[in-house]
Image (cartoon, rainbow, N blue to C red):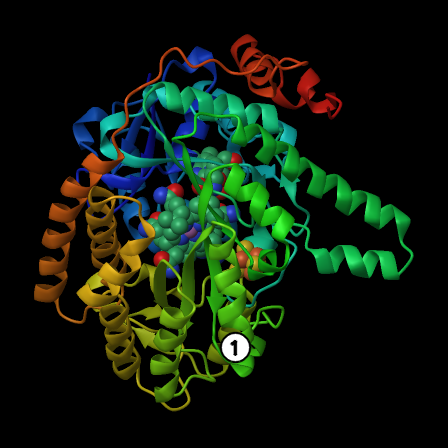
Amino acid sequence: MRVHLVNPSDNSFGTAVITPRWLFVLAAATPAVAGDPILVDESLEQIVPGSIQPGDIVGISVHTGNALRGYAVGRMARERGAWVVYGGIHATLFPEEALAQGHGHAVVKGDGDVAWGKAVADCMAGAPKPIYEGGRIEGSQFLAGRWDLMQADKYMWASVQTIRGCPKHCSFCSVWRTDGQQPRQRRFQSVIDEIVALRRIGFRFIALADDNFYPVTLTDLRLAREQGNAAKVDELMGIRNERFELMAELAKLPKDMVFFTQITMEAGEDGEYLDAMRKANIKGALVGVEAVTPEGLKAVFKDFNYSGEALSKQLQTFKQHGVHVLGSFIFGLPTDKPATFDATVAMALKAGVTFAQFVMMTPFPGTIDFVRWEKEQALEPTLVGDVPITRYWLIPTEVRPKMFTPHPSMSSDEISVRTQKVWDRFYDWRSVWKRSACTPTLKARVAFVLLSKLYRQMYAGTGISTDSARRKKAKTMARFMVKQTSKIFRSKPMPELQSPVWALPSTVSLLRTALATGMPADAGPFVVLPKI
Ligand code: B12
Ligand code: SF4
């Protein structure tokens, strides 16, 4: 019997940009008695059906974009006599669908760090339950990845998570609903140990796969103080201090490390925080700008963001403190007009963001936008073939519409074409070369240009290219660029690097011992470890 973990994808490039973290975390959560799992990341290569034997256990992660492929893999595995278990955000939101369409024996809802071990044990005993409630575990229970099982030469960036959950409630985002609004921070010792392990094997570029790296804003603190709510102030300060503790430890790691994270724009008001980020080698952050007008921001429940001149200034502040911004913008909001596209790219250029992405409005399940849309559709359902459009992820990709929610004044094609033009403008040679001046050497400048072009090639095509010939060309180009760019990210391993000696044993080693000895994972001493 073998355990297989499969990250489904229709597109295999042979090399990938960022490691799919769940794969390595679930590998760590696999009970020792089941042996080392076989990891298959289909963004590298497709699974070989012959590798699945009767009695094997196949864990598959699905998000909305890869659910259809994930279900095909699950059906194949079940036909070959394996136990099939689904997990991930999409399966969490639609467990019945994964069981029915993906022929799953079981679904783990929520966090898998603890529940996966139980599902594996039940499969091994021949009696899996249809649903496992993984819930939202404590930060102290988050596992480090089994990076020893990674094909290290295939990835440019490794990913490490430091916090889950986000206190905001943006209308297009499901994170605050699934991961919750209460930030759950991982113990910084465990984060540092994991990063050290990665640096030892030659990874110095690390994406911090966090929902929101800035969970407590200065405004949150001010409001709690104004309300005279001392308990709230203490709680918020506790969370904030833990972030500073983590950043102080990151700052002690080798100076060649480069971290990247995701953060809200409010961090721009907090010079102390940005300075700590810079010292911690967090060189860049994805900032959800979303819209450049107040109406647009209101439409997505993100009125805490700035617009106009203030927006440009706020984004520049990040750079002044040494943190580069990857600005993320959404097109297709009901408030968008043809002029919005030009205004957006002009703002992105003016604000000096180092990278930018321009995504089309997509109603992801679990969001306020999705609920609203489903209600509207219930009155007058639209079908594509026999699939309701509100289940668009089940529509075969060749016939799947590019946009799902009709815009009041523009067609989907018009929005696609205008979005593509914005990508073209932001990533034209002249602008990229100008932005590359932020790097110290000519070699670094060339690397920056390559990276920018790769980013544009890989991400602009998705959902936007209208014909298959163009999609094919874009993919071939992306494959070529990935090969060239991946060389830039290779670093010399540092096998001699040691983790600091912590006052308490790391949570990870305790949890590993618990898993190896078969002790129930939620009864371990790590649950009650005091914060230090
Ligand atoms: C980091 C991140 C990225 C990074 C890195 C992606 C990568 N290669 O890993 C980048 C920036 C590249 C990215 C890109 C995108 N992302 Co993203 N991303 C995230 C983020 C913040 C964290 C993901 C992560 O690594 N978490 C750490 C791991 C350990 O947690 P996890 O994946 O949740 O897995 C746990 C459980 O779900 C469960 N589990 C997961 N799989 C399985 C499988 C089994 C068998 C079991 C038992 C359990 C289990 O156990 C795990 C451990 O507890 C999530 C937000 C979130 N909270 O999930 C969004 C998120 C997954 N992304 C999202 C989206 C929309 C995208 C993009 C489409 C954005 C865009 N418009 O381009 C692209 C798509 C990329 C792609 N093709 O996969 C959405 C997905 C929504 C949905 N319903 O599918 C999310 C949820 C954010 C959101 N705004 O709602 N993303
Ligand atoms: S978009 Fe960002 S800020 Fe808004 S809820 Fe999601 S994670 Fe939080």
Badge 1 amino acid: Glu
The N terminus: image quadrant: top left
Q: Residue at x 18, y 32 (%)?
A: 48
* Residue that lies at the very extreme toward the top in this rendered image: 517
Q: Position of residue 399 (x, y in %)?
A: 21, 68
- Front residue of this view, candidates 388 and 207: 207
* Residue that lies at the very extreme toward the bottom in this rendered image: 409
Which corner quadrant of the image does residue 152 belong to? top left
Residue 151 visible (yes or no):
no
Q: Position of residue 494 (x, y in %)?
A: 35, 17
SS at mark 1 in the image: helix
Q: Is mark 1 within 8 Å of ligand 2?
A: no
Position of residue 224 relative to residue 130, above or below, is below
Q: Residues within 10 Å of mark 1 (few under 14, many from 20)?
A: few
Position of residue 82 relative to residue 156, above or below, is above
Q: Position of residue 350 (x, y in %)?
A: 39, 72
Q: Residue at x 71, y 38 (%)?
A: 241
The residue pinned by badge 1 equals 309
Q: Residue at x 76, y 39 (%)?
A: 238
Q: Residue at x 51, y 44 (%)?
A: 210
- Front residue of this view, candidates 293 and 114: 293
- Front residue of this view, candidates 416 and 156: 156
Residue 490 visible (yes or no):
yes
The C terminus: image quadrant: top right
Q: Position of residue 397 (x, y in %)?
A: 23, 61
Which corner quadrant of the image does residue 104 belong to? top left
Would residue 414 be found to the left or right of residue 213 on screen? left
- Total numbered labels placed on residues in the image: 1
Would residue 115 be found to the left or right of residue 348 on screen? right
